[in-house]
Each structure stands twice: as structure tokens, then as C-alpha cells.
Amino acid sequence: MEIILSKYGNIISTDDTSKSILKEIQSNLDIEDEIEINALNVAISTKSARIIFGYLYKKLTKIKFNRKIHFKNASTSFMFAVNEGIITELDR
């Protein structure tokens, strides 16, 4: 399954948007083997990345997260924010 982040806007930075994306991912986790996150032309704040991907990383554990969640068309800055968000969440 592919989740196209641009439908939420080109900048993901609000708690409401982050929670909507997290809800969409979670609703598909049990029924899909893999979820592809299409981040074409999308920027994400570290806080939003923590809310979405940090939470999922903690919930799924590293192995399951890496097996289930894949990124497509993600810029270097997008992936930096995702990694920082995960690290921040793990430190909590």
C-alpha cells in the first residue's frame, strides 16, 4: 500500500496533520505487509516525524519497522527529520 503524503500538504508540521497521517498508517499496518510512504515534494518537521515515525518505531521495534515501513521519493532533509524524530522519541 502507498500513502501519498502530499495529500496532507507540502509541509507536514502540525500535530493534527501528524496524527491524521499516523492514524492512516496504523489503520493499514495489520492488513498490509508493507506500507510505502511517498514523500515526493514534502517536507516534515522533526516534531511531526517524532509523532508519526518515532511512535511507530517504538511500537513496532526496529526490525518490524524496517520490514513494514518504506520511504519513496524522500529527500535527504525529509529522511534527516525522520531519523531525528525517531532518535528524539527513543530518548523520551
Image (cartoon, grey):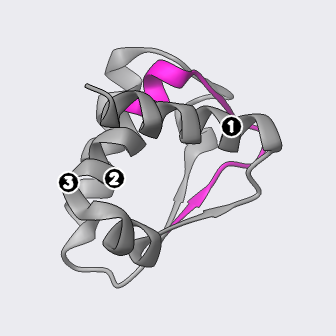
* Image side of residue 40 versus residue 60, left or right: right
* Image x and y of residue 29, in percent: 26, 68
* Image side of residue 22 versus residue 2, left or right: left
Q: Dividing the picture into quarters, in which one does residue 37 lie? A: bottom right
Label ID, residue 57: 2
Task: Give the residue number, with chain letter if any, for mark 3.
Answer: 59
Q: Dividing the picture into quarters, in which one does residue 76 lie? A: top right
Image quarter in which the N terminus is found: bottom left
Q: Is residue 25 magenta?
A: no
Farthest residue, direction top: 14
Image quarter in which the C terminus is found: top left
Q: Dot 1: what SS?
A: helix
Alpha carbon distance from label 3 to label 2: 6 Å
Who comes first in sequence, dot 1 or dot 2?
2
Q: Is residue 48 magenta?
A: yes
Q: Dot 3: what SS?
A: helix
What's the amino acid at mark 2? Tyr
User: Do tag 3 and tag 2 residues touch (Cβ < 8 Å)?
Assistant: yes
What's the amino acid at mark 3? Lys
* Image side of residue 79 versus residue 75, left or right: left
Q: Is residue 52 above or below residue 37?
A: above
Residue ID at (44%, 39%): 86
Residue ID at (29%, 31%): 19
Q: Residues within 10 Å of mark 1 (few under 14, many from 20)?
A: some
Q: Residues within 10 Å of mark 3 (few under 14, many from 20)?
A: few
Q: Which range of residues does the magenta coloring cover?
A: 36-50
User: Do tag 1 and tag 2 residues touch (Cβ < 8 Å)?
Assistant: no
Task: Give the residue number, with chain letter if any, for mark 1.
Answer: 80
* Image x and y of residue 12, in percent: 55, 25
What's the amino acid at mark 1? Phe
Residue ID at (77%, 34%): 77
